[in-house]
Amino acid sequence: MDETTKEAPVLFDANKPITLKTFGLSGIKPITLRFPSDDEWLERASRRKTIIEFTPTGDSISTVLEPDEEEIELLKNLAIDALPEEIDAHEAGRLIDQLEFTLHENPGEVIQGDQLHIILRVPGAVTTHKFRMPSSKELNNYDRKLHDQQPYGKKKISSVRNLPFLRDLYGKMILESSGYSGGTPIIHQADALFLAFINLKQEIDSTKNF
């Protein structure tokens, strides 16, 4: 083999099954799942509500709703084989959260000239996302629309991650992405964009020098 020959990079393939580990009274078992579609991620995000309650003193208390039975139904749809009967909503949610895994792995600066470069580890691969700089209006809209908040009874609101907005903004800002055998899943788009904006905001925050 020619020493100059490089191995092909490992690509993230949303159609490739992923094997995780589930546990219960009978011990630890492997479980093989397919990666959720964008529509399934969108539906799940709409259920993953955080309830924010405002107190008389002006403070707020945030409570994440418990996993529901729909987590089990989603896991059943993702499972390649039949699920162990002992899996409950909490374990189903934990497993699906692992499919959602991403990790920021930039070895250098995120801000490179007039671009934002994000290196994102996802299940089984490392991906890159290069964005143009946002406008001030886009930065303001990002802060306002990152979460979709709706009234939830007296002095409460529900808050969910606004994946449709993040998908649209990703499409407007992305210059180049790599590490995928197909399109970039919506959940990876949202995480890459989040990292790009948080790094940008830290860089332009002059108050840290006061």
Image: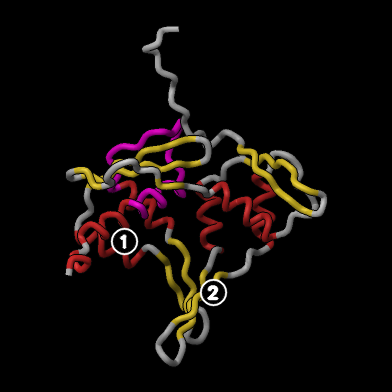
Q: Is residue 168 left or right of residue 23?
A: left
Q: Which of the 4 image quadrants contains residue 44?
A: bottom right
Q: What residue do we see at 65% from left, 43% from top?
A: 20
Q: Secondary structure at mark 2?
A: strand
Gap in Å between the C-alphas at discs 2 and 1? 23 Å
Q: Nearer the viewer, mark 2 or mark 1?
A: 2
Q: Residue furthest front?
A: 209
How many neighbours does mark 1 have within 10 angstroms: few (below 14), some (14-19), or many (20 or more)? some
- Quarter holding the N terminus? top left
In the rendered image, the vertical position of residue 1 relative to residue 72, given as above or below: above
Residue named by callout 1 = 142
Could you say where residue 179 lies in the image, as x and y percent from the top left? 41, 33
Residue 180 is a magenta residue? yes
Q: Residue 64 magenta-drawn? A: no
Residue visible at 45% across and 41% down in the picture: 121
Identify the magenta region: 172-195
In the drawing, does residue 20 fall left or right of residue 114?
Answer: right
Between 176 and 94, the one lying in front of the other is: 94
Place of residue 143 in the rendered image (x, y in percent of width and height, measured from the top left): 31, 65
Q: Earlier in the sequence, mark 2 or mark 1?
A: 2
Q: Residue at x 69, y 60 (%)?
A: 89
Q: Is residue 84 left or right of residue 155?
A: right
Amino acid type shown at disc 2 = Thr
Label 1 element class: helix
Tell me if residue 147 comes above or below residue 51 in the rendering: above
Query: From the image, which quarter does the C terminus lie in?
Result: bottom left
Residue lying at 66% horizontally and 50% vertically, measured from the top left: 75
**Badge 1 amino acid:** Tyr
Q: Which residue is mark 2?
A: 63
Q: Position of residue 25 (x, y in %)?
A: 81, 54
